[in-house]
Amino acid sequence: MKSEDSEDDDSDDDADDSDSKTKPPRKARQLASQLAFFDIIVSTPARLLHILSSSPSTLLHQVLHLVLDEADRLLSLDDIHHNTVTSLVSLEDAGRPADEGRSFLHQVDKVLEACGNKGLRKACFSATVPSGVEEMARSVMDADVVTVRIGGAAVDRESSNSPLPRIHQKLVFCSSEAGKLMEIRQMLGRGDVRPPCLIFVQSKKRAEELREELAVDGRSVDVVTGERTKKERDNLVRLFRTGHLHLLICTDLLSRGLDFSAVRTVINYDFPSTTAAYVHRIGRTGRAGREGWAFTFFTHEDAPYVKSVANVMKEMGEKIEDWMVGLDKPSREAKKNMKQKGVKRESIDTRPKKEKRREQAKKEMIEASKRRKRMNDGGKVGYGKKEHNNDDE
């Protein structure tokens, strides 16, 4: 059985439950009644807790094995991880208790509490394990915990794993954002990019901008972000896996979890915010014994953060220029800002300024019209909604 977060999961059920604010949607109650009949459950912590809220407290007492995939996120208290998830799926819209969204660790703690079997065996999997997360993992494990490492040795204290040895990595300096666009076009023209190729950027807006630029060149390219519906995302992934789509632009949404065994090239168009993000991004290629290629663009603004990635590459035997590993480490505050906000970058859009201003003005007019409509409709009773009855007070 597989339980996934989806925008469409409980939409029909919410309409059937007049008191949906006080009890879970019908689908959650149905799933809860069926869980005992399955041998394996695959779920996000929040979704599992949502289902358990309408089931007996002993439902998971027979569970023998608990596996935490992407453990570096599930056992982290970092707020940015929580913000990433709640931006993709709203806990409130899904009808879940608000306190379930505090942090992944808070959710995992509740799941562990629900698994009442004294013989429960736990396992954690992750491509990167920061020291703080490793300590947290050991605290939830049994005393006889065993650590298994596959791949490279420790790079530094922030990351205990490095990428697979079959990935050929290269840092590419571009003087500006315009230089990055020129570089990727030249790489595509020279045949340096072996499709299928994943291209990572730091925001959804930049993903759309880059798609438009490459589409103008006649490239087979599309974008997958959290704003796409589940059906649209699944369709894009299917086209990408079958070779009908050569270039797929994405944010860090796709740097984890999805297994694209045939991806040959990864391009970090925007420099990754952390070493762990870098490892997870390029880990989409070089899988199942295949060779992979990873190119990482960086500008003057990214220079303070190059050293950490250069160290990863050097650990894997790549030739790195001495000045890269000799750079000073960024301050703790700078690293925090990079992780939470990223580098402030110019737009990828190369259209004339006059055309950009005209489109921006059009967008502002549309938004203003929507606001006026919402204000005008604010006091009206919509179709299919119950009018408020003062006699009930």
Image (cartoon, rainbow, N blue to C red):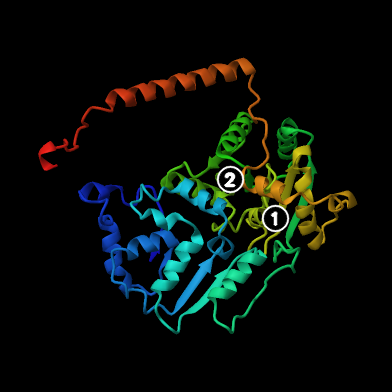
Question: How far across and how far down the image is residue 363, in percent?
Answer: 48, 22
Q: Amino acid at mark 1?
A: Thr
Question: How far across and how far down the image is residue 31, in percent?
Answer: 30, 63
- Check the image and name the residue furthest to the front: 393
Residue bearing the label numbered 2: 251
Mark yes or no: residue 194 visible: no
Q: Is residue 106 left or right of residue 156?
A: left
Q: Are marks 2 and 1 in contact (CB under 8 Å)?
A: no
Mark yes or no: residue 391 visible: yes
Q: Is residue 301 left or right of residue 238?
A: right
Q: Residue at x 66, y 64 (%)?
A: 130
Q: Is residue 96 left or right of residue 88?
A: left
Give the total of numbered labels.
Answer: 2
Question: How far across and how far down the image is residue 238, in percent?
Answer: 49, 50
- Check the image and name the residue furthest to the left: 391
Q: Amino acid at mark 2?
A: Thr
Disc nearest the viewer among 2 and 1: 1
348 or 117: nearer the viewer: 117
Residue bearing the label numbered 1: 275
141 or 233: nearer the viewer: 141
Q: Residue at x 47, y 74 (%)?
A: 66
Query: Label 1: how many residues lie within 10 Å, few (<14), some (14-19) or many (20+)?
Result: many
Quadrant occupied by the N terminus: bottom left
Task: Specify which label sits upstream in the sequence, 2 or 1.
Answer: 2
Question: How far across and how far down the image is residue 200, in percent?
Answer: 63, 45
* Looking at the image, residue 171 lies above or below residue 218: below
Quadrant occupied by the C terminus: top left
Query: Label 2: how many residues lie within 10 Å, few (<14), some (14-19) or many (20+)?
Result: many
CA gap between label 2 and label 1 equals 16 Å
Rendering quarter of residue 380 = top left
Q: Secondary structure at mark 2?
A: loop
